[in-house]
């Protein structure tokens, strides 16, 4: 009997000891989650290197891996005890053996409960500490608070500054190793800012100017890619720049990797616009930086066409745009550009012939524009045919004509679905549409990239003589406009949305006008947070049932726009001001007929000369108020 109790106590002590170890270890993942790019980060990396722990990971990551191994071993030990005890119980030939097995099971379960409680208690304690330090969560109270240590700085240029969008997105995860890095600017950029030694007579391949932009494993600036390791291409308007690794991939095939892209700012103003002025100014003069996570795999799935506007076979107003939506982001240099009477961009072409003489065909001049986070391209001709109600020029396709659209698949390299690089010019490295991993277009949708002509994607429609003049109308918003109850207490990552509508596809939006110049997310946050608050705008094409439009024959009925953004400041973090965020849509939003959202309208609010604005879905004689300012400053 004494031996039985001795074993039982020993196993109980074993389970308790394992639980105590877990309590100690469970505090470490909080450290593992901290950034090494701030104060002390480089020192810890140097310590790890000196200790022989280098190899692409910082010391925090290595500590996290060690902790993971220990916790895994603890789980294996407890599982072994449970399995052994279960076997002992089933094979026991007496009450003593069964009781001993049940006791072992109980002790193992106690160990598991201790581990679970350790996680829960540690998470609660650390959240309270975080609340006290950062002024967030818990029972935090007081004034505005200093959030600069919580929200990353050098981020506000996305949306409020010169950056319209970039890929990969901020804090994106599971990005394929063979991705390109792409930045879309609101204004033309001086090419020499981003291309080493560039002049108008420079012939590619173009190399990265690493004095201005660096790409490196997060926490390891010294491992930044060199100029010769990154080739740069750009669109003819000098707004979209694509950075491709030369003969190599990000990361490795066995573990995920974090990368940082850093664009220099400061008084030197290294990044400059086409006029020579610093691109980063005011609150955003320090530049811009972001991080993303790379997976262990390559993207070898070719892009497909999801939907088109207008659909094949119909006859449409000549002021309708041509729009193509893809299932993944496409390389802007392969899918956008200008075609003039002397030539130019030809990867996607529009041909027209009079209905009275279909044998007389000519290529229509105009521009293919990239938009909607690189998911959408649309064609606007250069033939002016009128002015909309906002005073913007409307451009028309040939009237009473048959129009054919053809998107070319790129020629393939020796390793399909990868496309062959056929030119070193700035307009495109490819002779057809490719995605951001360099995969050629799968125009017939069979899952394989087979190059031209098999995978070219095309369709035809007709135009009428009379233009369509119906303007888009806001049908609904999320949160609901003018609803104080529904607009309060929103989740910190809530994304404002607005659905448009109207007859004859008037609610289908011109994607290139859905941008951060025309859609804003204003806030009353203190000035100290200006360079932390970023936002971007995207659009979704929807059918009559409200579902995403899928299929070349499916008709897009309306569009919905959405605003992604940095997490809101919690309303519980301050007692002297209430964080407030106001989405605003400008009149420069157009529909696919190029008619503008002007002056403002919804199903329940119609602007008049006396009340030219709709604010929170109600007529207003002046401009809509921005959020209330803070009553104190940090």
Image: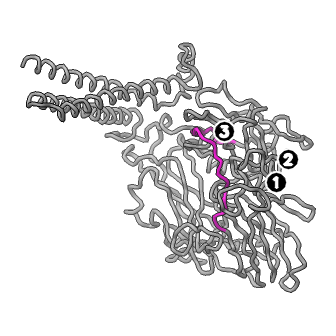
Residue sitting at x 25%, y 32%: 82
Whole-angstrom CA distance, mark 1 to mark 2, is 8 Å
On screen, residue 336 versus residue 65, left or right, reads: right
- Figure disc tally: 3
Task: Describe the element under mark 3 as helix, strand or loop.
Answer: loop
Q: Position of residue 220 (x, y in %)?
A: 62, 26
SS for callout 1: loop
The magenta-colored residue range is 280-307
Work out whether 222 lies above or below 230.
Answer: above
Q: Where residue 47 sits in the image (x, y, percent)?
A: 54, 16
Q: Residues within 10 Å of mark 3 (few under 14, many from 20)?
A: many
Which dot marks residue 285? Answer: 3
Q: Which mark is residue 1?
A: none
Tell me if I can see residue 379 in this picture. Answer: yes
Q: Residues within 10 Å of mark 2 (few under 14, many from 20)?
A: few
Q: Which residue is mark 1?
A: 431
Residue that appears at 55% across and 26% down: 57
* Residue bearing mark 2: 423
Kindly indicate whether the residue at mark 2 contacts the one at mark 3 (C-beta within 8 angstroms). Answer: no
Badges 1 and 2: C-beta atoms under 8 Å apart?
yes
- Residue sitting nearer the eye, 609 or 587: 587
Residue 372's spot in the image, x, y percent? Answer: 64, 58
Q: Which tag, 1 or 2, sits closer to the chain's start?
A: 2
């Amino acid at each position: 009997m004494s031996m039985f109790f001795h074993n039982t106590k020993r196993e109980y002590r074993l389970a308790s000891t394992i639980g105590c170890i877990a309590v100690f270890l469970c505090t470490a993942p909080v450290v593992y989650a901290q950034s090494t790019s701030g104060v002390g980060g480089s020192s810890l990396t140097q310590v790890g290197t000196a200790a022989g722990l280098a190899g692409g990971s910082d010391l925090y990551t290595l500590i996290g891996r060690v902790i993971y191994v220990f916790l895994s071993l603890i789980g294996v030990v407890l599982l072994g005890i449970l399995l052994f005890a279960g076997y002992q119980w089933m094979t026991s030939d007496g009450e003593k053996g069964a009781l001993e097995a049940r006791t072992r099971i109980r002790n193992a379960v106690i160990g598991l409960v201790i581990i679970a409680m350790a996680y829960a208690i540690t998470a609660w304690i650390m959240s309270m500490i975080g609340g006290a330090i950062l002024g967030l969560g818990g029972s935090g109270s007081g004034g505005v608070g200093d959030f600069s240590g919580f929200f990353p700085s050098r981020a506000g240029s996305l949306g409020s500054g010169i950056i319209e969008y970039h890929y990969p997105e901020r804090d994106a995860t599971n990005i394929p190793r063979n991705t390109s890095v792409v930045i879309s600017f609101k204004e033309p950029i001086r090419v020499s800012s981003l291309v080493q030694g560039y002049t108008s007579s420079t012939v590619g391949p173009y190399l990265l100017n690493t004095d201005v932009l660096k790409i490196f494993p997060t926490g390891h600036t010294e491992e930044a890619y060199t100029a010769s390791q990154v080739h740069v291409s750009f669109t003819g308007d000098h707004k979209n720049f694509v950075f491709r690794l030369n003969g190599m991939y990000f990361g490795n095939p066995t573990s995920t990797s974090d990368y940082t892209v850093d664009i220099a700012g400061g008084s030197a103003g290294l990044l400059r616009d086409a006029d020579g002025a610093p691109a980063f100014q005011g609150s955003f003069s320090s530049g811009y930086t972001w991080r993303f996570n790379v997976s262990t795999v390559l993207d070898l799935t070719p892009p497909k066409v999801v939907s088109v506007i207008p659909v094949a076979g119909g006859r449409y107003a000549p002021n309708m745009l041509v729009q193509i939506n893809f299932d993944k982001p496409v390389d802007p240099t392969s899918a956008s550009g200008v075609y003039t009477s002397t030539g130019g961009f030809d990867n996607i072409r529009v041909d027209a012939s009079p209905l009275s003489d279909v044998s007389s065909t000519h290529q229509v001049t105009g521009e293919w524009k990239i938009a909607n986070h690189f998911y959408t391209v649309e064609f606007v001709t250069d033939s002016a045919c009128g002015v909309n109600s906002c005073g913007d020029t409307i451009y028309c396709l040939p009237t009473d004509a048959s129009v054919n659209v053809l998107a070319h698949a790129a020629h393939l390299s020796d390793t399909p679905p990868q496309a062959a690089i056929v030119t070193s010019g700035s307009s495109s490295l490819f002779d057809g549409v490719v995605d951001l991993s360099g995969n050629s277009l799968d125009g017939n949708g069979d899952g394989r990239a087979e190059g031209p002509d098999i995978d070219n994607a095309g369709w035809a429609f007709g135009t009428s003589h009379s233009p369509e003049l119906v303007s888009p109308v806001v049908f609904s918003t999320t949160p609901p406009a003018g609803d104080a109850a529904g607009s309060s207490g929103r989740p910190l990552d809530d994304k404002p949305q607005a659905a448009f509508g109207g007859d004859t596809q008037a609610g289908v939006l011109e994607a290139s006008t859905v941008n951060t110049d025309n859609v804003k997310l204003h806030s009353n946050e203190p000035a100290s947070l200006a360079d932390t608050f970023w936002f971007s705008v995207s659009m979704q094409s929807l059918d009559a049932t409200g579902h995403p439009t899928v299929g070349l024959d499916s008709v897009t009925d309306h569009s919905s726009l959405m605003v992604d953004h940095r997490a809101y400041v919690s309303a519980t973090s301050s007692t002297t001001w209430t964080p407030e965020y106001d989405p605003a849509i400008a009149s420069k939003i157009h529909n696919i007929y190029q008619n503008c959202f002007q002056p403002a309208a919804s199903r329940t609010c119609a602007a008049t000369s006396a009340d030219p604005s709709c604010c929170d879905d109600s007529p207003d004689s002046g401009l809509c108020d921005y959020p209330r300012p803070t009553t104190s400053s940090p």
